[in-house]
Image (tube, grey):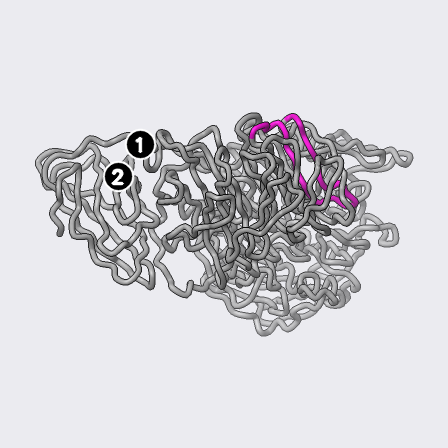
Amino acid sequence: MRSTRHLLAGLALTAGLLAGAAPATAAPTPAATTAASYTWKNVRVDGGGFVPGIVFNRTEKNLVYARTDIGGAYRWNQAASSWTPLLDAVDWDHWGHTGVVGLASDSVDPDKVYAAVGTYTNDWDPGNGAVLRSADRGATWQRTDLPFKLGGNMPGRGMGERLAVDPHKNSVLYLGTPSGNGLWRSTDSGVTWSKVTSFTNPGNHQQDPTDTSGYNSDEQGIVWVTFDESTGTAGSATSTLYVGVGDKQNAVYRSTDAGATWTRLPGQPTGHLAHKGVLDAENGYLYLAYSDTAGPYDGAKGQVWRYATATGTWTNISPVAEADTYYGFSGLTVDRQNPGTVMVSGYSSWFPDTQIFRSTDSGGSWTRAWDYTSYPNRANRYTMDVSSVPWLTWGANPAPPEQTPKLGWMTEALEIDPFDSNRMMYGTGATVYGTQDLGKWDAGTNFTIRPMVQGLEETAVLDLASPPSGAPLISALGDIGGFRHTDLTKVPSMMFTGPNFTSTTSVDFAETKPDTVVRAGNLDGGPRVAFSTDNGTNWRAGQEPSGVTGGGTVAASADGGRFVWSPDGTGVHTGTGSAWTASTGVPAGATVESDRVDPLTFYAFKSGTFYASTDGGASFSARATGLPAKGNVRFKAVPGKKGDLWLSGGAPDATYGLWHSTDGGVTFTRVAGVEQADTIGFGKAAPGATYPALYTSAKIGGVRGIFRSTDAGASWVRVNDDAHQWGWTGGAITGDPRVYGRVYVSTNGRGIIYGDTSETGGGDGGGTTEPPAPTGACKVAYKVTSQWQGGFQADVTLTNTSTTAWTGWKLGWDYPAGQRVGQMWNATPVRTGTAVTAQNVGWNGAVAAGASAAFGFTGTWTGTNPVPAAFTLGGATCSVA
């Protein structure tokens, strides 16, 4: 993805998320269960980001994987023609592991799959890379941390594959690494890794050596590893393997002794980078796709070469003379059913379209996916059908020779199914395309290309809004602008257009007139603000004050009559959209929001100070101070309650948490027990409650997760679990004002996630069905299983010592020293504070006579942490073990 590579650049520096490092006061991790019953799905967009790698297993049909630059890895589900996400368990502290720079599927044991993960090699990602290994096709993973970083979202990420499994001895793997770290090998199926010291060229290519950020100045390093399977036997390491290096003068190396020694291939072409090296072992050809840059956006010249492995002969088989190229080559594949058939892509051919070439005689001659008839008219060998993902037309109506939808762009992943010559898949900057009748290419009739992307959701979510009427969700996304979802289970027909922002940075609606919607975003040359009067269905571009360079944040008044905009490049302004006036008393770059009741009241925040305006944004005055001055801070006003505000944010090495104000920001009270919080949102109140449900991405009770409160922040329940974490979720969150329990969660690369609960209520007054009061005797065993400074974990076993079975239970106790419960599992905290009530979940309410039910939780303490003296069940006192 283009712009989202910058999204976490600043956030990573402030979040302090170091992979593999324990927190200063290391809390134990509770069991991977959830305190509330939630199911999680993606709001459907179908794609949206760059897919740099597609990997078919060579021995099992229909076993296919895809890797993304910031959104994890996926496995193809043939029965459903969809992709299954594999890295949703990546946690907050390891968010960089959602960037996948290499992927390998084991052809000896197809249950095994490996992923090399890490997003940035500069300081945008403070954590090191890792190799993940799975013995169940990615359902679960084990991790080996590396002593250096990997760059799933760095220049050169479309080259590869950098990770490879020996096809004869699958305990041996190789990993090509960036930043001068060289070639690495594992001989125990990825458990441990060591540097191949005999391989002495770590690569030297930098996209831009002058880039002080370290992004374009990093060295791409070792970029692919390819085995010659004809040189080995089952159980013995493959003798011959080839390695591609980011070095324009020394791009290809070979070992003929299973990696013990290496030599530069003599006679090889120079002056370019070998993006891919694909071997046709049957005919003895190594094919190489070259570009003058590492990609994935750029590349002005390229070549394609064939190396005869037996004779050492090099042949330039470029489908276009280098003098006539304005792009590089990268996507490269061989038809394993007919190895003389080769395909290659001109990945960086932006105008008028990408180009794909095909040869059926080992590169002796080529045909193109499209040709000019008489410029600017084109004849295509294919038909594009994007009816399943109609927004891929971008709402465009380009003049020839451009067409919509495009054949693609950034087409670095290109693969023919090794079991089916008619099926091909290729990745672009926004989707996965494919065909199932590729053979028609050679027959001279059009084959059909369709999106093969369902289930693969890769968008960076920058803002979310759920109005009380109209569409349930309006989103602000990186790279593809955003959408109005009237049905969460269906792909919208189009992203926002008129104008079409490259990234939408902020979206808001008028609380009492939700048909009025405003969005701000980035667009070269502007306009960067747009307005809708029909709930986001249609848009008109607004005017801009001078100096605007980016979208910033924007807010609509409660009645939709006025807007306050804080764009990048200039100060805060107020107006109607057709004219703007500079606001006074508020610093440039402040985050702005509106009161959801009073149409004249707006709020702003910057650098630890909260501001308010009571004259429609014309002037602001400072109110509360002492709020987080470092890190990312977000705040929102509660619908229907004037002056009721919640503010979240901060940084681990500074002030960090969640605050509440009921006086319009004059004062804020920090919410006890919330150690860190990054987002805050509101949803429909629980049954029987009047205050909206609160949702936050936060750290509470030593646990990072998505939390909900149904009692105005007095207590919190974690609603996600360890299998559903999605890396970094600190961009935006909102509940749904029409559906209790529904929450929309932003991710940085896994799209918009939404959760629904099977509960009928939640929290105090939430309408939870009251279990029948147990009768007879009970016994409680309460044990603190772990304790650290300020926190603890406890297990509770409740035993039915009567002669009558229970059909439900609710256990209460008081803390003698003011301790508080944080996250609870295998029970629901109906009431928390110093007085606690825990109720059974659905599956453990029935307790036979003499049987027990167990649950656990994390909590906080100050001073001392004594065990409660008494426990009650249905008004009766239990004995304490």
Does residue 753 appear left or right of residue 438 in this picture?
A: left
Give residue 303's position: percent from left, percent from top: 79, 54
Residue visible at 46% across and 58% down in the picture = 143
Q: Amino acid at mark 1?
A: Thr
Give residue 197's position: percent from left, percent from top: 58, 74
Q: Amino acid at mark 2?
A: Gln
Q: Which residue is mark 2?
A: 839
Quarter of the image where one finds residue 762: top left
Nearest the camera: 419 or 826? Answer: 826
Label at residue 244: none
Quarter of the image where one finds residue 404: top right
Depicted 272 relative to depicted 728: above or below:
below
Q: Which residue is mark 1?
A: 768
Give residue 334's position: percent from left, percent from top: 67, 47
Residue 5 makes an appearance in the image: no
Depicted 383 relative to depicted 815: above or below:
above
Element on which disc 2 rests:
strand
Provide the residue span drawn in magenta: 512-534
Q: Is residue 566 within the magenta segment?
A: no
Q: Which residue reaches farthest left?
A: 803
